[in-house]
Image (spheres, helix red, strand yellow):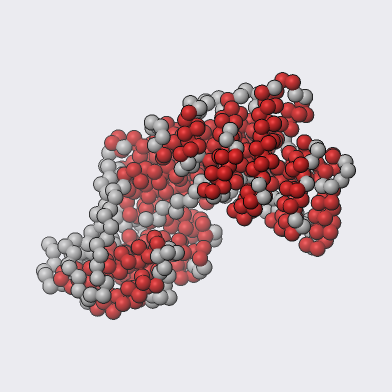
Amino acid sequence: MAKAKKVSRNSRVRRAPVVNPNRRSGLGGLSKEAARDEKVLPLIAKLASAEPKERAMAASAIATLIEEPTMRQLLLKEKLVHTIMDQSLSDSSEEVVMEAFGILRNLAIEEGYDICVFLWRRDVLTAMAAWLEKVKGRLDNFSALGADQKSLTFDLAEHLISLAENLGTCSDDIMDSVLDRLPGLVEFALKLLSTLFVPASTKAVAAEALYALSEANGAVLGQIQAAQFATDDDQRPLVKVYLSGVEYNMYEAKVASIDLLDVVRPVVAVVKSIDVGASLAQLRAAADAPEAAPSADTAAARDAVSAVMVALELLTSVAESVVAGAAKTAPPPAEDDMDDDEAEPVPDMDVDEDPAVADLSESPVAELLVADVIPAVNTLVGHADLRSRALNCLNNLAWTLNTVCATAPQWLAYAEALWTSCAGLLKDAADVEIQTACVGIMWAAAKSFGGAVPVELDDVRWLTTLLHNAAGDDTLELRVRIVGLLGVLGMRQGRLEITKEVSVLLFTLAALVPKTEPAVAIEALNALFDVFGDQAYDYDAELFVRGGMLKRLTDVQPQIKQMAKKIDKRKNLELRTKADEVAINLQRFIAYKRDEQKTKPRK
């Protein structure tokens, strides 16, 4: 199945999704050496200035430069993190401290695991805990604060919460430390969300942290549930989506009685309510004028697009949950002796699919996915900045619906439309992610129709060329999906030339092991099992029997066994398991086809 691999949603959406490709890099035309001497070193030196304002301005400038990869590396080479930890976090100016936490937050976002582990080992949590208590105290006495101190307090809150989120989602050990050393973090984030005078930007950061920290985390979910968490219809779109994400995390962890429909409906409503085109245009205009002061319109547009991106991420995960709930738990494969040439004949090689509903009224969630979710997501494919995310979401939705309601007329109507649109998009796409998603959607659509989709021999050859031209680790999933798609197309009877083209490719991929990567070879063999699963197929006698496929597969069998044995199960247990299964199934398939040829063809 070509569903997107499950990735932790803690690899979160960036808050500024649109980048102007014409915008100059942070080097501003300077060489690295010149940028170091003219920008980096002066800024780091100013962190030790006698003037608090100069220190704060330098820290603010550094926080911005960190977003540019080259400048970030130059700053890190000059021991920026050590300077911030040893000097800026204990600065007498609270503004400098606030900017220092902002620098660490940005570094954690951009650099990820390595920086987070380093900060944790340097005991950044001690400073964070102290300042979090100060922020809490100020919010309790908020009316007594001046305007500047109020703004500073909210900035500190955002940086501390976001840094804690990035640290916690980095590893389980650090998550445990964050929850232990910052025991009031979850309660504080919830309080920010329920307090009227808290700015929208701060609420968005708090909601994002709750969403990320609560993923598969019973301790955090327990704290949220104990606080009688409930979504607020008055919240802005981005916060609404994050809080729906928290509800989804509760649903997945089964810590509360939550209807998945109640999670999905508000997310779809948010997507429908946003003028995505106008928001993207606003962000591009802002990117084209980097020197202009940030505007409220730009902030609103950024939040709107971020809301859509998080919604796509969430809906992609929801699709997985629907299938996981419907899937049966298959027993492990029998322990076969893979060195035996004979195996007990398998009476039927047909895939035992989970039963799918034909009437969507029997599955309210599937009905919602077809009626509301797919149309809403499909409209986003037209926006280049969101296309990859939208297609990945559609890919998971397509496979979900192929599993739970493959024959439902409403789904088949969309499956046909998705086949047509993705086939056209695939021909024009150069981006591997776009190609991979398109092929996955086409595979699911074709499978729902049993391969009976409009396709010509030239289309099969074009896909074969795409397969052969794809190279590198980043194209492996694309190649696996192309093989799977071609296997479904090859199963359709009445198209002898297409089936012949496909079967030759599938066998060639298997025969070229070990040159063919195991994942591709496994998919090719599984496709062959399906294509030639019954001698009654109108092409079986011509292609399998007279083509001598049985002997050729028998000759390939030792290579497949060796391929499986060479995969280190300690490094890739999933792939090794699949390889062992396909080696066993090849042995069974050969025995099955050998026995089948001894009998009369089925009527």
Q: How many marks?
A: 0
At a point 44% along the width and 36% down the height, the residue shown is: 250
**Quick check: 383 above or below 368?**
below
Q: Say which of 223 and 586 sits in front.
A: 223
Q: Position of residue 585 (x, y in %)?
A: 27, 66
Residue 40, quarter of picture:
bottom right
- Asked if residue 284 lies left or right of residue 401, the reply is right
Q: Say which of 363 and 179 sits in front.
A: 179
| Residue 9 visible | yes
- Asked if residue 599 lies left or right of residue 491, the reply is left
Q: Position of residue 542 (x, y in %)?
A: 23, 73
Q: Dividing the image into 4 quarters, which one contains the N terminus?
A: bottom left
Residue 480, quarter of picture:
bottom left
Q: Position of residue 342 (x, y in %)?
A: 20, 74
Q: Position of residue 442 (x, y in %)?
A: 40, 55
At a point 58% along the width and 25% down the height, the residue shown is: 194
Q: Dividing the image into 4 quarters, which one contains the C terminus?
A: bottom left
Q: Residue furthest right?
A: 50
- Asked if residue 110 lies left or right of residue 365, the reply is right
- Asked if residue 536 lies left or right of residue 172, the reply is left
**Quick check: 507 above or below 575?**
below
Q: Residue furthest top?
A: 143
At a point 48% along the width and 36% down the height, the residue shown is: 221
At a point 27% along the width and 67% down the height, the residue shown is: 584
| Residue 407 visible | no
Residue 374, quarter of picture:
top left
Q: Say which of 198 and 348 sits in front.
A: 198
Q: Say which of 87 and 225 sits in front.
A: 87
